[in-house]
Structure formats: structure tokens, C-alpha cells
Image (cartoon, rainbow, N blue to C red):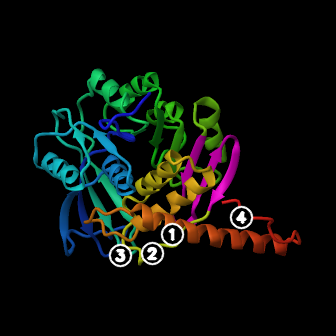
């Protein structure tokens, strides 16, 4: 199909909302009636918002679809998209825009408290079909009416990715997304110590050719076409101040590589670099790594990884590698 100026690269579905950020002196909070904190701020930026931001920062054309309410939180979401140049199609959310409270500790760890009573509504099927006909790829959040959009996306023939976040490998809510996506991201947080059986189940029972489990500072694992490999962690370019949005940034970096036609190893390293960058951005800000910085950092990352691999081979008595292959 010939592309036009109205087409775009990625359709992001779901995951629009507002976080109230509270910086706390420690996590978990001690048992106390009240605590003094410095700075409480509400800002737009749930998982779909941050994936859209990360992809846009890398130069991809993005369109975001999600239900948004006629409320102050909805105003913040719409302003976020205007400010960052991300087109937004926003059917009405009758019970209000999604919101959460994020407690952020001094080391950047967070605890998120989600308001489960918001974010209802639906996406008109014709809207999903029209947007899907114009994109190369769709990234689907596990929120709101996204599950009903999955068959429409598959009929349109676009590749699909999803982020299962802290899935435990058993909860039924996540399964339709896990089994319908070509690329599945999830956190290691609630998985067994060995996540490989869950990863292989997703690939065996669904259509995923890539399953990626992120583990923060420990890096990630990816299962691609049946082969399990480790993605080393990237070194953050500045002090770590907040882990909020790091998984979304990883997904954006990975998808950027995939849409460039990069091999899985490089996609994983792009994800690691983008995720590490996100950890240096305060929770009250919305900023993503750009393509030039990502590619430069990934080149250094690849060189270091190759040097480490050669050192491991020499220690094992196998001699140096025969070439870079990048």
C-alpha cells in the first residue's frame, strides 16, 4: 500500500491518564498519621502517554487513541498531547479520565495507586479501523476498551505490541493481550524467579515472535523465534531520580529499532538505553531521549558489550571474536 502524508508509524491505544506525584522520604512509608512532604504535582503521563512520547521523541509519527473525560485531568491529557505534538483521538470517558497517585522515594523507586473507577467508555470500531488502516504498527495498553480493539487491529494486518506490566503469568485479564500481540513486553516484578516458562507459554499459545521481560537495573531477557538471550542493562547518562516510565521508554526504544528493521539484539539495546535515560528524568517532567542520543549511546553500549563478550571468550579459552557483526 502506498503511504500518504496522512499516514503515521504507530497507533498507541489506551493508557492515557494523570498521575499525582508525591515525593516521599522513604518507601514503604512508616505507619504514621501524617507526614510532611515537599512538592505534590499532578501531570499527564500514563503508560500510553509515555510510549507515545518516547516514540515521538525518536522521530516516529504517532497517533494516540483513548477515552478521556471532560474534567481537569482530561484537560491535562489534552494539553500534554498538544505540547508534544502528538495527535490524540479521545472518545468520551463518562466516568472520568484515569488517574493515579505515584509515591516516589529518594532512590527513584515508586509505588503507584490507581483509581480503578475511571477510564470507562469505548472506541467506535470504525474509528479503530480507520486509524489502523493508516499505521504500520499498533501498541496496545491493557486498559479500558483496548481488548475489543484487538480483532479490528488483527483484521487490518498491522503488527501489534503490548505491555503486560507486572503480570504474574496467571491473571486472566492479561491473556487476550498476551496472545494477540506480535511483541509482548512485561516486567519481571511479579513473575517467578525463572520467567522463561511464562515467556515460552506466551510464544507457544499466542502469535508473539518476541517476548521481552524487563528487570530494571538487571537488564532484560528476550525470547525471539524460540531463542532466549539476555539484554544487559545500560548505564544511565545522569543520576537516577525516578523509575516511573522506564518500562514505557524501553518499549518505545525497542519498537523504534523494530520499525527500522534492526535485529533483535539491537532492538533490546535500544530499549535498554531509552529505559536508562527515562530513569534520569524527574517524575514531574515529561522528556524522552532523541534518536541521535539513542544511537550514540547504543553504539557505545554495543562496543562495551562486544568487549565484555570477547573477554568472556578469552577467559574460557576460545580466543577473540571474529568480527563485530553490527
| Residue closer to the observer: 190 or 69 | 69
Question: Where's the N terminus, which quadrant?
Answer: top left
Mark pair 1, 2: CA separation = 9 Å
Confirm or deny contact between disc 3 and disc 2 (CB under 8 A).
no
- Residue at the location (56% across, 49% down)? 212
Residue, disc 4:
324
Instruction: Name, please, the residue furthest toward the left.
Output: 71
| Residue closer to the observer: 230 or 202 | 230
Instruction: Name, please, the residue furthest toward the right.
Output: 317
Q: Earlier in the sequence, mark 4 or mark 2?
A: 2
Callout 2 environment at 10 Å: few (<14), some (14 to 19), or many (20+)?
Answer: few
Q: Is residue 224 magenta?
A: yes
Residue, disc 2:
237
Q: Earlier in the sequence, mark 1 or mark 2?
A: 2
Q: Secondary structure at mark 2?
A: loop
Mark pair 4, 2: CA separation = 24 Å
Seen in the image, is 323 located left or right of residue 199?
A: right
Q: Secondary structure at mark 1?
A: helix
Q: Earlier in the sequence, mark 1 or mark 4?
A: 1
- Residue at the location (19% across, 72% down)? 39
Q: Quadrant of residue 281?
A: bottom left
* Relative to 181, residue 214 above or below: below
Q: Which residues are magenta?
A: 210-231
Residue, disc 3:
106
Residue, disc 1:
297
Seen in the image, is 39 located left or right of residue 200?
A: left
Amino acid at each position: 500500500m502506498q503511504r500518504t502524508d496522512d499516514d503515521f508509524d504507530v497507533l498507541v491505544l489506551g493508557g492515557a491518564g494523570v498521575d499525582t506525584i508525591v515525593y516521599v522520604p522513604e518507601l514503604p512509608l512508616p505507619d504514621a498519621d501524617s507526614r510532611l512532604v515537599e512538592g505534590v504535582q499532578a501531570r499527564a503521563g500514563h503508560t500510553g502517554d509515555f510510549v507515545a512520547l518516547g516514540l515521538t521523541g525518536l522521530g516516529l509519527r504517532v497517533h494516540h487513541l483513548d477515552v478521556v473525560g471532560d474534567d481537569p485531568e482530561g484537560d491535562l491529557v489534552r494539553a500534554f498531547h498538544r505540547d508534544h505534538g502528538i495527535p490524540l483521538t479521545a472518545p468520551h470517558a463518562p466516568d472520568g479520565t484515569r488517574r493515579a497517585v505515584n509515591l516516589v522515594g529518594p532512590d527513584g523507586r515508586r509505588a503507584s495507586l490507581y483509581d480503578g473507577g475511571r477510564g470507562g467508555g469505548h472506541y467506535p470500531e470504525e474509528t479503530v479501523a480507520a486509524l489502523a488502516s493508516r499505521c504500520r504498527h499498533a501498541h496496545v495498553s491493557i486498559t479500558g476498551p483496548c481488548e475489543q480493539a484487538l480483532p479490528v487491529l488483527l483484521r487490518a494486518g498491522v503488527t501489534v505490541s503490548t505491555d503486560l506490566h507486572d503480570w504474574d503469568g496467571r491473571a486472566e485479564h492479561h491473556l487476550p493481550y498476551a496472545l494477540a500481540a506480535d511483541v509482548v513486553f512485561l516486567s519481571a516484578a511479579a513473575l517467578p524467579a525463572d520467567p522463561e516458562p511464562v515467556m515460552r507459554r506466551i510464544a507457544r499459545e499466542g502469535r508473539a515472535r518476541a517476548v521481552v521481560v524487563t528487570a530494571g537495573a538487571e537488564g532484560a531477557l528476550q525470547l525471539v523465534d524460540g531463542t532466549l538471550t539476555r539484554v544487559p542493562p545500560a548505564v544511565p547518562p545522569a543520576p537516577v531520580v525516578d523509575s516511573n516510565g522506564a518500562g514505557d521508554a524501553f518499549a518505545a526504544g525497542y519498537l523504534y529499532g523494530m520499525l527500522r528493521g534492526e535485529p533483535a539484539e539491537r532492538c533490546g539495546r535500544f530499549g535498554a538505553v531509552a529505559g536508562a535515560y527515562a530513569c534520569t528524568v524527574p517524575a514531574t517532567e515529561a522528556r524522552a531521549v532523541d534518536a541521535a542520543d539513542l544511537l550514540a549511546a547504543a553504539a557505545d553500549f554495543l562496543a562495551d558489550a562486544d568487549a565484555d563478550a570477547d573477554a568472556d571468550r578469552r577467559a574460557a579459552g576460545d580466543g577473540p571474536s571474529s568480527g563485530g557483526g553490527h
